[in-house]
Amino acid sequence: MNTIQSKPELTDPAFVDSKKFVTFLKGDQDRHETMNLPLAMSNVILHKIYSLSPLKSLSKVTYTSGDKLDVVIDSNDSDDSGWIKDEIIKYDDISAISKTSIYLHQLFAKPRVAHTLLEDQTTNVEDFIHDKITMQMAAAENKSFLFGDGISQPKGILKYEIAIDEKKSHQIEGVIAGEPGKIENYSKIVELMERLPSKYLSRASWIMSRNAASHIRTIRDETTGKFLWQNSIACGVPDTLLGYPVVICDDMPKVTAEKKCVPVLFANLYEGYHIAENPNINILKDPFNAKPFIEFYATKRIGGDVVNFDAIKALVLQKGE
């Protein structure tokens, strides 16, 4: 005799969390309500943001529950390894070790939905809200990783000074590739690649906008006549430039006729840029300030900063003096 068993999803924590979220979304629409998303649901949003943000997917990401993350920086170029000898090991280079703090800032997204959408019991409104939060937060994050002021948002890579001549502390080394408006100098692209220390090449990538990519695609090797750019032959595999993957980031500056622009980076961002993030996401339902729509105010905390300037190189277009 067969017995009827209860549906397993009714007791599954993920199912219970989803039902709580739907109840929160479609509940009383005439009052403010707030909810901390269950961690499993927050992780879904964070994973989607990670896949949509080219800079975040290349950088090192550390989750923390605090207001800041302290990162130890060792500016000593020597390797901390070797062979043990019958003598006392002296740490003469302890002065090369320092600490930087990455402060977390509050990021928000404000998706809006119509009353009728929430009242429709057949609509999967939770996925709609998830997707809106994901798209809005991913766009804000990626732009801040390049241009953020470090005060109310992460400190962006291109907020630091690009050193053309002699590189100083807390500057990114740059290579002038010619006048603004075009990229066509083969030797300067090769030089930029060679400026990155060998120990960072294993995870190095070219980072540029589609606009910059359209210029570089046409450059040929001056010796062989072959294109430097190689198109991918498989889905999900990036194009390559001089053998290293190209990551398209539309927030990168375009090739313009401005006096100075930085349209291309060649970097190992896993070593060069560190992101600190609190995985918790809070949502406030506001039925009053965006009538006739209901606004959902989602917030989370995130920070980022350059931690290794040697792992990032920049291509610069600049007018001659």
Image (cartoon, rainbow, N blue to C red):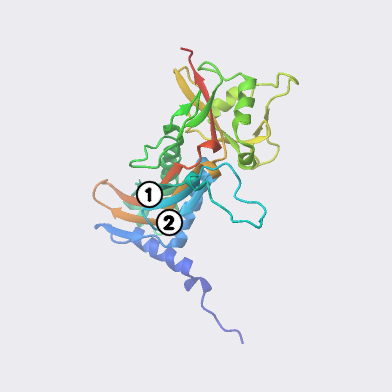
Q: Please tell me in which quadrant of the rendered image residue 187 appears.
A: top right
Q: Where does the image place residue 203, in percent across and percent down from the top left?
A: 61, 42
Amino acid tagged 1: Leu
Reading the image, the residue beneath label 1 is: 104
Q: Tag 2, which secondary structure? A: loop
Q: Is residue 87 above or below residue 211?
A: below
For image coordinates 66% across by 58% down, the residue present is 86
Measured from the top left, where is residue 8 in percent x and y? Answer: 52, 73
Quarter of the image for residue 215 reads: top right
Marks 1/2 in contact by CB < 8 Å: the verdict is yes
Front one among 270 and 92? 92
Give whichever of discs 1 and 2 has the lower sequence position: 2
Residue 61 location (% of width, % of height): 49, 50
Image quadrant containing the N terminus? bottom right
Q: Is residue 149 left or right of residue 174?
A: left
Give the residue number, with chain letter if any, for mark 2: 64
- Is residue 3 at all visible to an observer of this figure? yes
